[in-house]
């Protein structure tokens, strides 16, 4: 293999490794037949339906990952909602804790408990005010 082939192979391996480390992105499902809106700049994050009239645009499912910050997951939801043209998102917190596991620490020769850390996750309904 020539130098160009080795560089190309190395670039592919590095790109694959970086893609594997990427945080999960929120899934967006539009409501069938809903209108298409231009992107919005500001999106409210709500923990209950608003008192004013609205229409549902779609759902956003942000699974999160162990070690992720709650604020990072909420920022991903807000970005997806802005792209949908939503004015707000009605959130449901579906966070959970990762199961704890034990492993042998080769340095100390003792077992350590790993995991049990929170995994922030949310489901949301993107809405447009009438």
Image: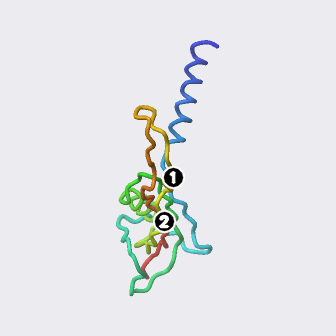
Q: Name the residue under label 2.
A: 84
Query: Looking at the image, which residue is at 45% across and 76% down?
Result: 128
Query: Looking at the image, which residue is at 43% across and 86% down?
Result: 53
Choose between 111 and 41: the one closer to the eye: 111
Q: Confirm or deny contact between disc 1 and disc 2 (CB under 8 A).
A: no
**Numbered tag placed on residue 4 in the rendering:** none
Q: Is residue 75 left or right of residue 126?
A: left
Disc 1 versus disc 2: nearer the observer: 1
Task: Determine the CA span between mark 1 and mark 2.
Answer: 19 Å
Position of residue 27 measured from the top left corner of the image (x, y, whole percent): 55, 60
Q: In which quarter of the image is residue 1?
A: top right
Q: Residues within 10 Å of mark 1 (few under 14, many from 20)?
A: few
Q: Name the residue under label 1.
A: 24
Total labels drawn: 2
Q: Is residue 91 above or below residue 54?
A: above
Query: Looking at the image, which residue is at 61% across and 12% down?
Result: 2
Query: Looking at the image, which residue is at 49% across and 61% down?
Result: 62
Choose between 109 and 67: the one closer to the eye: 109
Q: Quadrant of residue 70?
A: bottom left
Choose between 52 and 120: the one closer to the eye: 120
Q: Is residue 40 above or below residue 55?
A: above
Local secondary structure at mark 1: loop
Q: In which quarter of the image is the C terminus?
A: bottom left
Q: In this view, does 110 lie above or below 24?
A: above
Position of residue 106 measured from the top left corner of the image (x, y, whole percent): 46, 33
Q: How crowded is mark 2: few (under 14 residues within 10 Å), some or many (20 or more)?
A: many
Position of residue 22 measured from the top left corner of the image (x, y, whole percent): 49, 45
Choose between 93 and 128: the one closer to the eye: 93
Q: Is residue 92 above or below residue 76?
A: below
Local secondary structure at mark 2: helix
């Amino acid at each position: 293999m020539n130098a160009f082939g080795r560089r190309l192979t190395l670039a592919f391996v590095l790109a694959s490794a970086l893609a594997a480390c990427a945080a999960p992105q929120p899934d967006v499902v539009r409501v069938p037949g809903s209108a298409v809106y231009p992107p919005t700049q500001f999106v409210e994050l709500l923990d209950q339906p608003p008192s004013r009239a609205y229409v549902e645009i779609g759902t956003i499912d942000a699974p999160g990952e162990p070690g992720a910050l709650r604020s990072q997951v909420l920022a991903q939801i807000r970005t997806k909602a802005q792209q949908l043209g939503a004015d707000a998102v009605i959130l449901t917190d579906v966070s959970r804790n990762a199961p704890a596991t034990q492993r042998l620490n080769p340095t100390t020769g003792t077992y350590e408990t790993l995991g049990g850390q929170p995994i922030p996750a949310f489901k949301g309904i993107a809405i447009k005010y009438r």
